[in-house]
Image: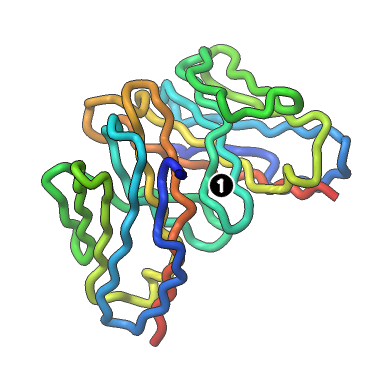
């Protein structure tokens, strides 16, 4: 089974520039998550999709961050304009079903390798 | 109060030691609980799910205490390869998101 694919793996930009990250989840996984992980901290949820609909984006800084999941498969996360504090690893994860699923194992998250962003 | 709190660590233990991590959560409606392992500069990977009755997987034992709202992870006979950051993950309700703790760093030394 192919895993969660993310690109690019690394990106260096200057503040006020824009950047986009791409994620392709595991085939058949309905739920897709974007997390931000700052060095030394745990992953922080930015947005959760169920198929192509947004379930939770309460922690997404909507003035500069946007995300979409067209056709309920691939997803892109965009930052525009970037700030120094956006330097982090952006992790995409997918699960077969939403987090509250009662089906054993269906809500387990599988992560991609992440996209490491450095904002100078 | 943070939604998910963990022992900050770091924990430095010799090979063969037993080490325990605790994690507390604030949402009493939480339903799913997990421990993930994250190696340096790698993505988190599932270590084990945590069930109400407690569960064991080899040298690893996870327990859940709903009344006190905490989960624990016990590692017996520590190996050098157990060195990693251990992340506590809690989910509350259908369609609710998975919330991660800040992680506890473990270093097992020869």
Q: Residue at x 60, y 38 (%)?
A: A6
Does B19 sit above or below residue A102?
below
Please state the horizontal and vertical placement of residue B2, each as a whole percent of the image.
46, 44
Give the farthest residue toward the left.
B53
Q: Residue at x 35, y 84 (%)?
A: B14
Q: Nearer the viewer, residue A74 or B8?
A: B8
Horizontal side of residue A42 vs B34, given as left or right = right
Q: Secondary structure at mark 1?
A: loop
Does A29 sit above or below residue B54?
above
Q: Residue at x 46, y 37 (%)?
A: A2
Label tally = 1
Does A68 sit above or below residue B6?
above
Does A46 sit above or below residue A39?
above
Image quadrant of residue A76? top right
Q: Residue at x 27, y 49 (%)?
A: B70
Please state the horizontal and vertical placement of residue B61, each as a whole percent of the image.
20, 59
User: Which quarter of the image is occupied by the C terminus of chain B?
Assistant: bottom left
Please state the horizontal and vertical placement of residue B75, each as a whole percent of the image.
26, 67
Q: Nearer the viewer, residue A18 or A41?
A: A41
Horizontal side of residue A21 vs B78, given as left or right = right
Residue at label 1? A113
Please state the horizontal and vertical placement of residue A78, each as a whole percent of the image.
72, 28
User: Which quarter of the image is occupied by the N terminus of chain B?
Assistant: top left
Image quadrant of residue B93? top left
């Amino acid at each position: 089974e192919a895993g969660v694919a993310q690109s690019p793996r690394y990106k260096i930009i200057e503040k006020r520039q824009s950047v986009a990250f791409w994620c392709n989840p595991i085939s058949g996984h309905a739920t897709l998550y974007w997390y931000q992980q700052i060095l030394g901290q745990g992953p922080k949820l930015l947005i959760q999709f169920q198929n192509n609909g947004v379930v939770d984006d309460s922690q997404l800084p909507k003035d500069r961050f946007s995300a979409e999941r067209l056709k309920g498969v691939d997803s892109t996360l965009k930052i525009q304009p970037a700030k120094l504090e956006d330097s982090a690893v952006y992790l995409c994860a997918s699960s077969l079903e939403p987090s509250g699923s009662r089906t054993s194992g269906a809500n387990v998250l599988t992560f991609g390798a992440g996209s490491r962003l450095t904002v100078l | 109060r943070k939604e998910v709190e963990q022992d900050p660590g770091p924990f430095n233990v010799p090979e063969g030691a037993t080490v325990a991590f605790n994690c507390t959560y604030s949402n009493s409606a939480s339903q799913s609980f997990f421990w993930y392992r994250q190696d340096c500069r790698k993505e988190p990977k599932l270590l084990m799910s945590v069930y109400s009755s407690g569960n064991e997987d080899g040298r690893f034992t996870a327990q859940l205490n709903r009344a006190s709202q905490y989960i624990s992870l016990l590692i017996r006979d520590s190996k050098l390869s157990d060195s990693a950051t251990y992340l506590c993950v809690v989910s509350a309700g259908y369609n609710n998101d998975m919330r991660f703790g800040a992680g506890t760093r473990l270093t097992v030394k020869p």
